[in-house]
Amino acid sequence: MPELPEVETVRRGLAPVMEGHVIAHASVNRPDLRWPFPPRMAERLTGRRVQALRRRSKYILADLDSGETLLIHLGMSGRMLVSGDPLGVFVHDHPAPEKHDHVVLEMETGARITFNDPRRFGAMDLMDTATAEAHKLLAALGPEPLGNDFNEPHLVAALHGRNTPIKAALLDQHIVAGLGNIYVCEALYRARIHPGRKAGRISARRVAALVPIIREVLADAISAGGSSLRDFRQADGELGYFQHSFDVYGREGHPCRTPGCEAKIRRIVQSGRSSFYCPSCQR
DNA sequence: ACGCCCTCCTGCGAGC
DNA sequence: TGCTCGCAGGAGGGCG
């Protein structure tokens, strides 16, 4: 579920309780999520110090002092709950275990990190840190949308000749890594591009304009996530989702927010996913 | 290589 | 109140 901004928000929420700290005990409550967990995962995590918490696309990567890296993917419904942290970042008591609490990390500090994922589309894996980029799930990913490798020439070249709708092209993680259904809808609205338009038939000028728009949409969402992190500290410590107001996503039938536009937001289904757009602003 | 479709799984809200 | 239905933010895999 969570797209890049939510995953980055989760990473930032986990960093103070994980980075530099030792996992005193790991509990793994089932053999798999989307895929089987790696062999002896609990043993390979227990006693390890987390040296750094990174993000690649929608994946969180925890580098351990054993030379291994823990990959965490939240899938559609994965959440992290941080509780009992004596550092005072999160001040919540440990909650009672809930259904779908699949992996629990008890930190030496007393903090507890619980991975809860009802739909089990999430994943965890362990790999050698030195060759992490070669991991099956990471190797083919396109550039980070907030990084320097995501630029106008790259996007123009990646979309050139593509017969697929721009909506599907931007969801393709080989082209740009980290966008999901919500932020593609939002970016196309800001760029005034109809989601059904063929990717290869958009002028280079309009494609180039998409690059800074995608960056802005994500950056705005990350700052909104940052404010919601502060709310988590006062609320319940749950990481993974945050309240954010969207211009088109989930607003079918509501008025377009473009000043002077009288149209209502529409929903269509493209390759099985909902697309929201303004029929007047987006062409 | 590309484009399209299906699939995994549970939960929730709308509508009857 | 209780059902059934449709839908959900991801992404790998198989097909033509």
Image (tube, coloured by chain):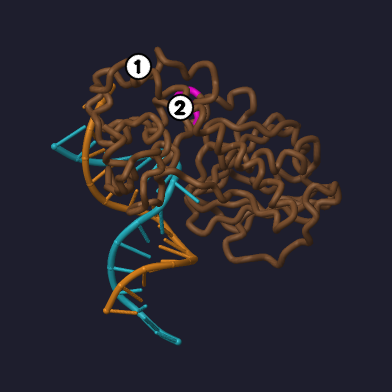
Chain colours: A brown, B orange, C cyan
| Amino acid identity at mark 1 | Val
Residue A242, image x and y in percent? 58, 49
Residue A109, image x and y in percent? 84, 48
The magenta stretch spans residue A242:
no
Q: Quadrant of residue A262?
A: top left
CA–CA distance in space, label 2 to label 1? 14 Å
Helix, strand, or loop for circle 2?
helix
Q: Residue at (57%, 61%) from the top-left corner?
A: A100
Q: Residue at (62%, 34%) from the top-left corner?
A: A61
Whether residue A263 can be seen here: yes
Name the subunit of mark 2: A
Q: Is residue A260 above or below residue B11?
A: above
Q: Which residue is mark 2?
A: A213
Q: Which residue is mark 1?
A: A156
Using the image as rendered, state which of residue A31 and residue A70 is in the foreground. A70
Question: Of all residues shown, which one is farthest toward the front?
Answer: A260
Q: Which residues are magenta?
A: A138-143
Name the subunit of mark 1: A
The magenta stretch spans residue A142:
yes
